[in-house]
Amino acid sequence: MKQKTIKSLTKRFKATKKGKLLKRKAGQNHLNSKESGKTTRSKRNDWIVAKDSTKNILRLIK
């Protein structure tokens, strides 16, 4: 029997065609004015999930 997809993970992660996982960097919703411009710019980019976690998360997404 197939395991149910975990909907919270499908909203947080995006799988690329090559099998990598993209995730949004944490801490960019509010209270960003006190941070430096460098951290603000770095949070705009998506984060690539580590390979050891990717296999488990992909199994839960599909």
Image (spheres, rainbow, N blue to C red):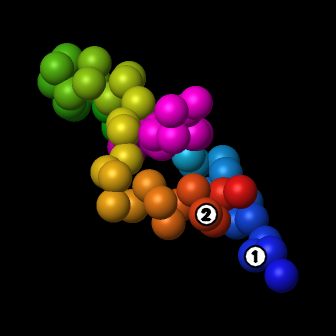
Q: Is residue 28 something that shows in the picture?
A: no
Q: Earlier in the sequence, mark 1 or mark 2?
A: 1
Horizontal arrangement in the rendering, residue 5 relative to residue 33 (left or right): right
Magenta span main SS: loop
Over which residues does the magenta segment extend? 14-29
Residue 1 magenta-drawn? no
Q: Position of residue 43 (x, y in %)?
A: 33, 29
Amino acid type, mark 2: Arg
State whether residue 61 is above or below residue 12.
Answer: below
What's the CA distance linking mark 1 and mark 2?
Answer: 9 Å
Q: How many marks?
A: 2
**Near-viewer residue (51 or 26):** 51
Q: Are marks 1 and 2 in contact (CB under 8 Å)?
A: yes
Horizontal arrangement in the rendering, residue 11 relative to residue 18 (left or right): right
Q: Position of residue 38 (x, y in %)?
A: 16, 20
Q: Residue at x 34, y 52 (%)?
A: 51
Q: Which residue is mark 2?
A: 59
Q: Position of residue 37 (x, y in %)?
A: 19, 17
State whether residue 43 is above or below residue 49.
Answer: above
Q: Which residue is mark 1?
A: 3
Q: Quadrant of the C terminus?
A: bottom right
Horizontal arrangement in the rendering, residue 41 relative to residue 61 (left or right): left
Q: Residue at x 83, y 82 (%)?
A: 1
Identify the secondary structure beneath mark 2: helix
The residue sitting at the right extreme is 1
Which of the numbered marks, if any, corresponds to residue 40?
none
